[in-house]
Amino acid sequence: QVQLQESGPGLVKSSQTLSLTCTVSGGSITTHYYAWSWIRQPPGKGLEWMGVIAYDGSTYYSPSLKSRTSISRNTHNNQFSLQLRSVVPEDTAVYYCAADQNWYALVSGTGVTYWGKGALVTVSS
């Protein structure tokens, strides 16, 4: 059973960079056709897909966040990471890492096979 665990600071100051890491166990991030994604949920709002890194290392981002977002991976440690630059208080959210072979599920946030528990990140002004 694949398990995902987010880690990183819970508080970030405005204009700084938010950095989170997702540690994967029970499966490899290079497993064919799997995609590994970051999804966030601001307080009182719905899920927002941020981007994905595929099994082959290719990356794709939400157009609305593309200019500020980077997703990378460390295959040796079986981890993938998120960087969100120039954060503002509106970036406060619970950040989830997730995985599926179905990219539509990841983008829509519905029917995703594997989820982390989520990490609350608060951006202070």
Image (cartoon, grey):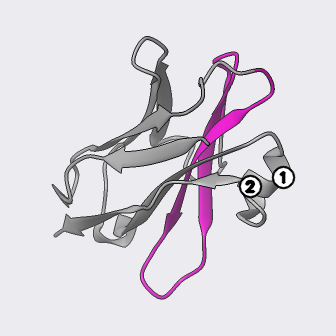
* In this view, 63 is above or below 119: above
Give the left or right position of residue 20, taking residue 51 as reference.
Answer: left
Residue at which label 2 appears: 107
Asked if residue 98 is among those painted magenta in the image, a careful observer would answer no
| Vertical order, 68 against 94 (above or below) | above
> Is 48 within the magenta?
yes
Question: Is 9 situated left or right of 31 in this image?
Answer: left
The percent position of residue 42, horizontal first and vertical second, equals: 45, 75
Number of callouts in the render?
2
**Residue pointed to by mark 1:** 104
Identify the residue at image location x=55%, y=33%.
26
Identify which residue is drawn at 51% across, 41% down.
Answer: 67
Residue placed farthest to the top in the image? 76
Range of the magenta residues? 32-60
Where, by quadrant of the figure, is residue 37 drawn?
A: top right
Residue 4: x and y in percent read: 48, 45
Residue 58 in picture, x, y percent from top left? 68, 21
Q: Are marks 1 and 2 in contact (CB under 8 Å)?
A: yes
